[in-house]
Image (cartoon, rainbow, N blue to C red):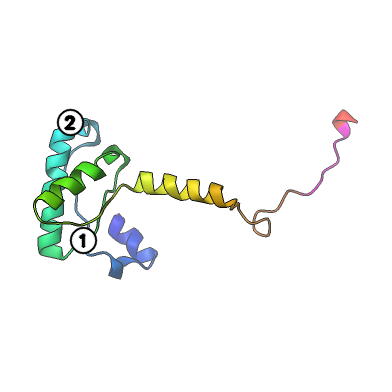
């Protein structure tokens, strides 16, 4: 699914590796098991696929980026680890801080309609 999406978005050539930890969603609460699996897959992606950045791919992995980064760095792999949910939140915060809103050229106000029922 992710490979197909990357192709459709024209990003496939920018992705060095797509890996999975093979842990069912309902078992993601075992943070130790999840961290070990993420670490293992990250090291393999770095060594075998030439990965320079690790991007976590599931909201069940929220809050794992800092520990994973520290663990990888301690093992000699100083690569950024990105939590996409946190990145998206920070992006929205920056839009709000800059006063950026959607374009009224694209998302115009609906036309005025007669409201006879309350006149």
Foreground: 13 or 84?
84
Could you tell me how far apart the alpha carbons at marks 2 and 1 are, in whole angstroms?
Answer: 25 Å
Q: Where does the C terminus fall, quadrant-wise? A: top right
| Quarter of the figure with the N terminus | bottom left
Residue 77, by quadrant, is bottom left
**Tag 1 secondary structure:** loop
Number of numbered labels in the structure image? 2
The answer to whether residue 118 is left or right of residue 64 is right
Q: Where does the image place residue 12, in percent across and percent down from the top left?
A: 30, 67
Q: Earlier in the sequence, mark 2 or mark 1?
A: 1
Residue at 53 percent across and 51 percent down: it is 95
- Residue placed at 39% from the left, 64% from the top? 9
Magenta residues: mostly which secondary structure?
Answer: loop
**x%, y% of residue 85?**
37, 44
Nearer the observer, 54 or 105: 54
**Disc on res. 108:** none
Please give the range of residues in magenta: 111-116
Q: Is residue 107 visible?
A: yes
**Extreme residue in the bottom direction:** 13
Residue 46 is left or right of residue 85, and the answer is left
Task: Specify whether residue 21 is in view.
Answer: no
What is the x, y in percent for residue 69?
20, 48
The residue singled out by tag 2 in the image is 30
Give the quarter of the image for residue 89: top left
The magenta stretch spans residue 93: no
Toward the right, the furthest residue is 119
Which residue is identified by label 1? 17
Which residue is at a point 33% across and 62% down the rendered structure image?
A: 6
> Neighbour class for label 1 at 10 Å: few (<14), some, many (≥20)?
some
Q: Nearer the viewer, residue 98 or 17?
A: 98
């Amino acid at each position: 699914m992710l490979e197909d999406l990357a192709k459709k978005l024209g990003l496939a050539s920018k992705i060095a590796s797509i890996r999975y930890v093979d842990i069912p969603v309902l078992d993601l609460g075992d943070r130790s098991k999840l961290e070990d699996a993420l670490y293992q897959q990250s090291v393999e992606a770095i060594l075998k696929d030439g990965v320079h950045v690790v991007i976590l791919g599931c909201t069940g992995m929220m809050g794992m980026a800092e520990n994973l980064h520290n663990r990888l760095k301690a093992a000699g792999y100083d690569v950024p680890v990105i939590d996409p949910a946190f990145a998206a939140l920070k992006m929205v915060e920056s839009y709000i801080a800059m006063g950026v809103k959607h374009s009224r050229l694209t998302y115009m106000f609906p036309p005025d309609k007669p409201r006879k029922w309350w006149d």
